[in-house]
Amino acid sequence: QDGGYWRVKGAQLSSVFVPLDPVSTDNCLSFVPGSHRWPLHNPMHFADGTQYSGTSLPQMPDVDAMVAAGAVNLKQFELQPGDVLVFSSSTVHGGRGNWGRALSTRWAGDDCTFWARPGEGAVPTGQLNLRDGDPLRRNPAAFPLAWHAQHRA
C-alpha cells in the first residue's frame, strides 16, 4: 500500500506506473484484488525491511501466507513500454522482480487532505504549512493543479 507512506488522506489517491521497458509477469508487481478496502498498514523501509516507527498503523498481514492458504489471490500484468497501470494507493502490491526503467507518479483528487499522523512518514516532505485536514490545494506549490473540470450552471 502506497498510502501508508504518505501523510495524505483521501479515497482519490492513485499511483500511476508507466514502464519504459517490457515487464513480464515473472518480474512484475503483484496486486491483491479487493485490498483497497483494507485499512492502511504500517509501511516498511525499502532499504532494510524494517517497519516505520510510531505510525499507529497496524502491521501488514503476511500476504505470502494468505496466498499459500488460498485466502487471497494475486494479479499480475504483463506490460509493454508506454502501457499505463493506475491503481488505488490503498491497494496492497509488491514484487521481487526488476521492473526496469519506469515512470511512477502519484495523483491526488479533490478529497485528499494533509494527514498529520504520528511517527515516520515519507511523503510529502519539507515545510508544507498545512495542518491536519487541510486540503492539499492550499499549497499549490507542493501540490499543483493538473486538471480542473469546467463548471457550468
Image (spheres, helix red, strand yellow):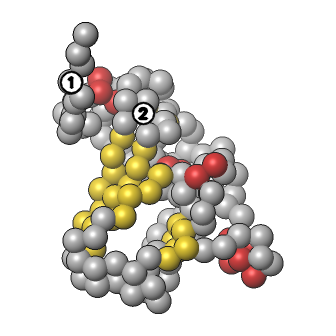
Q: Position of residue 114 (x, y in %)?
A: 43, 32
- Amino acid type of disc 2? Cys
Gap between marks 2 and 1, in whole Å? 20 Å
- Amino acid type of disc 1? Gln
Q: Residue at x 24, y 82 (%)?
A: 21
**Callout 1: few (<14), some (14-19), or many (20+) C-alpha neighbours within 10 Å?**
few
Q: Position of residue 73 (x, y in %)?
A: 66, 73
> Label 2, on which residue?
112
Is 8 above or below relative to 45? above
Q: Quadrant of residue 61?
A: bottom right
Relative horizontal placement of residue 117, taking residue 135 as reference (left or right)? right
Quick one: 1 or 45, which is closer to the camera? 1
**Mark toward the start of the polypeptide (2 vs 1):** 2
Q: Residue at x 38, y 25 (%)?
A: 135
The secondary element bearing badge 2 is classed as loop
Q: How many marks?
A: 2
Q: Position of residue 39 (x, y in %)?
A: 66, 47
Q: Quadrant of residue 66?
A: bottom right
Is 121 above or below relative to 20? above
Q: Residue at x 60, y 63 (%)?
A: 33
> Can the viewer see residue 40?
yes
Relative horizontal placement of residue 6, taking residue 106 as reference (left or right)? right
Q: Residue 77: give its label.
A: none
Q: Quadrant of residue 126?
A: top left
**Callout 2: few (<14), some (14-19), or many (20+) C-alpha neighbours within 10 Å?**
some
| Most distant residue in the right direction | 69
Quick one: 79 or 30, which is closer to the camera? 79
> Label 1, on which residue?
150
The secondary element bearing badge 1 is classed as loop
Point out the frontmost of discs 2 and 1. Answer: 1
Q: Position of residue 8 (x, y in %)?
A: 45, 39
Q: Residue at x 29, y 84 (%)?
A: 22
